[in-house]
Image (tube, coloured by chain):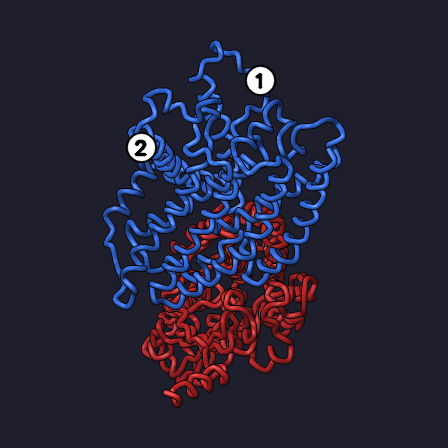
Chain colours: A blue, B red
Amino acid sequence: MENLNFVYNLIGQNWLAILVIIVLPLVFVLLYALLAILGELKFASFFQDRLGPMRTGPWGIFQPIAEVVKLLQKEDITPTAANKMLYNLAPFLMFTGAYSAFAVIPFSQYYVPSGINVGLFYIFAVGSVGVIGIVMGGWASNNKYTILGAMRAVAQIVSYEIPAGAAILSIAALSSSLSIQEIIIQQSGWFWNWNIFGGPGGFEKIWVIPFTAILFVIYFISSLAETNRVPFDIPEGESELVAGYHTEYSGMKFAFFFFSEYANMFIVSAITVILFFGGWNSPCGDLTNGWFGGAEWWIILRDVFWFVMKSFFFVFVQIWLRWTLPRFRVDQLMEFGWKVLLPISFICFFFVALWAMVR
Amino acid sequence: MKEKKNIDVAYSLLESDRMRLNVGPQHPSTHGVLRLEVELDGEIVTEVVPHIGYLHRCFEKHCENMTYPQCIPFIDRLDYISSMSNEFPYVIGVEKMAGIEVPERVEYIRVIMAELNRIANHQIAVATFGLDAGAFTPLLYLFRDREFILSIFEKASGGRLLYNYFWVGGLASDVHPTFKEDVLDIIKTVRQTNAEIMDLLVENRIFVERTANVGILPADVAINFGCSGPMLRGSGVAYDVRKAAPYSIYDRFDFDIPVGMGERGTLGDCWDRNIVRMREMEQSCRIIEQAIEQMPSDGDVKEKVPARVKVPKGEIYVKAENPKGELGFYIVSNGKPKPERLRARATSFVNLSVINDISKGYMFADLILILGSIDIVLGEVDR
């Protein structure tokens, strides 16, 4: 583990390597967004007893590309009364918030864009940048619906950052580290070493398992609120606020909001996987380490496969929930956040920290 | 400068920082071209003023220039979700005035069609109510089932939305040969889907939280405003024209009037209004089953249709239980082939009038749900 990045091994430690490292996640996000849009369309159709898009390509697999082309062609409208600078800046700020999180997401043990030792803290910090974009867009549009959506988004983020923070804090206490790579390495081995099962340890860890499992549920619920997905999509609550904070946006600027939402979906899924499901670790431990002579390319491929698969599963769960559940009301959401999730997350944090002390 | 500052303070002390928001007519959940002028204090609704008339088509004036049978297509367009049921009171009224006795078979087919239409209407009502709460999937399940009902209507009348099927003295055409089996099949599907919807939507914890204790309409307010249909029954008043003043052959069937009981919250809340619709679908299924069993298998549905409808001088008020409530027609005849006056007591219009009273003090998101639970059709509100 002397080198965090396989790219450095390939082309040496120079500016080109840095550029490649920066661009790789972007390529991934673009491909993933196309896949996720298709997944959303198709899964929604299957849940709803219909076929979904079928005309663009075989089984409609080119639909997301058609959507992107459509959005590119659309007129880019800026309302006359809008604050031009903030209005134009907002979608990009939101995407910046989403994309900066990729800086510390390790896809493999040989690929971390930036191996800083406070990765968890960083991810939590930049995760909140997106909401500035929402507020900026909502306010700058100069529309009553958008400002309502923006205010709701802020109230929601404030209510849900804290339970999510408590969940992240518990894992930091459990692993005694804020470095993402370190947290993942601690969970290596078979799947019972994952943090959702109380992290590595003997049979005596059995009493901490309920708390880590509850923390996972809390984190996942909070992350749904962070990505503004059903049942917490109240900032863009379609039936009340038309389209919420992005009502006035069209064309590519709307696409950026859309794109950030999907990128956020992946990020929260990736964090869930890192914190609770062993990150890039294979569920069957070191069993496949020796295949192909334990070559580096094989390890990278395996890590990426498991990391992406696990993350995609949680993206799928988010899509699944979206097409099943109704929407919360804004006061119920805050009540749920402050009165239910927050106390439970603190209790869990207490017991997990206790376990981390005594083990 | 000092003065200006004082004005600012007074401004905020007066709680004047309220926002006036135009909801509609292009808003996604106003169920048509309704404009609600909403005054908001933060997210709390303090006043709702419905502005109507975007879909006004001079229905009543039009009908004065049409012969009695020619009015029926216009009546279809009142509550375009339940056209069959709209035609029912009108043809009954004209038949009563003209002294026409319709054959048994026609009566049964009319009842079956009207009840199927009630199911179709309530499916839309529940589906869009769920959509207002943010649940998209139940909408598609219910619309899928509605298609089967519409195909029955299509086979009978040729139309899928506007039927012109009930004629004065009979029906436009006879039903297709496999009508009975098809209708029984549909009832089976409707029951199956409704059980699914109960699980997926109506009993869903989030949905109950959203709709229970919201938009409470006490029985006395409902009666004072003249509400009818599921709106009134949701508040616990068991008033149904089919039972209170049976028309056509409704006295021959055994069915219950579902009323709201405040199971999940307070009596008369949005959840109650919705569950009344769910249970009415089941009652309609029961009526259809009985009607299918008793229906004479042959007979000419057009034998009593007069070549020229002659209505003697006089006037009549006739009412029927539309899916949305009591639909009444006041027909004035001067002995000529055209009505002198045709006045419709539109259910949706009356039901909508209560919105300001029941939505004050709730959140903005609740207002949308309350509007959804009233189940209006703008075609009927504006006429």
Q: Nearer the viewer, mark 2 or mark 1?
A: 2
Left/right placement of residue B145 relative to residue B198 reads left
| Foreground pick, B168 / B139 | B139
| Sequence-first disc among 2 and 1 | 2
Which residue sits at x=57%, y=48%? A165
Q: Amino acid at mark 2?
A: Leu
What residue did someone put label 2 on? A19
- Please identify the quadrant where the C terminus of chain B is shown: bottom left
Question: Label 2: few (<14), some or many (≥20) within 10 Å?
Answer: few
Locate residue A69, reporting x and y percent.
Answer: 26, 42
**Residue bearing the label numbered 1:** A286
Expressed as whole percent of the image width and height from the top left, the position of residue A84 reads 27, 61
The three-letter amino acid code for the residue at tag 1 is Asp
Residue A8 drawn at (x, y percent): 37, 24
Q: Chain of mark 1?
A: A
Which quadrant of the rendered structure holds the N terminus of chain B? bottom left
Image vertical order of residue A141 relative to residue B198, above or below? below
Which image quadrant is residue A101 in?
A: top left
**Do we see residue A22 in this rendering?**
yes
Is disc 2 in the same subunit as disc 1? yes
Q: Label 2 lies in what chain?
A: A
Instruction: Please say whether residue A61 is visible from this viewpoint.
Output: no
Q: Residue at image x 62%, y 60%?
A: A335
Numbered circle sitting on residue A338: none
Q: Is residue A289 left or right of residue B172?
A: right
Circle 1 residues within 10 Å: few <14, some 14–19, many ≥20: few
Q: Nearer the viewer, residue A131 or B283?
A: A131
CA gap, disc 2 and disc 1 = 32 Å
Counting from the top left corner in percent of width and height, residue B168 is at: 44, 68
Label 2–label 1 contact, CB within 8 A: no
**Does residue B117 lie above or below B321 as drawn?**
above
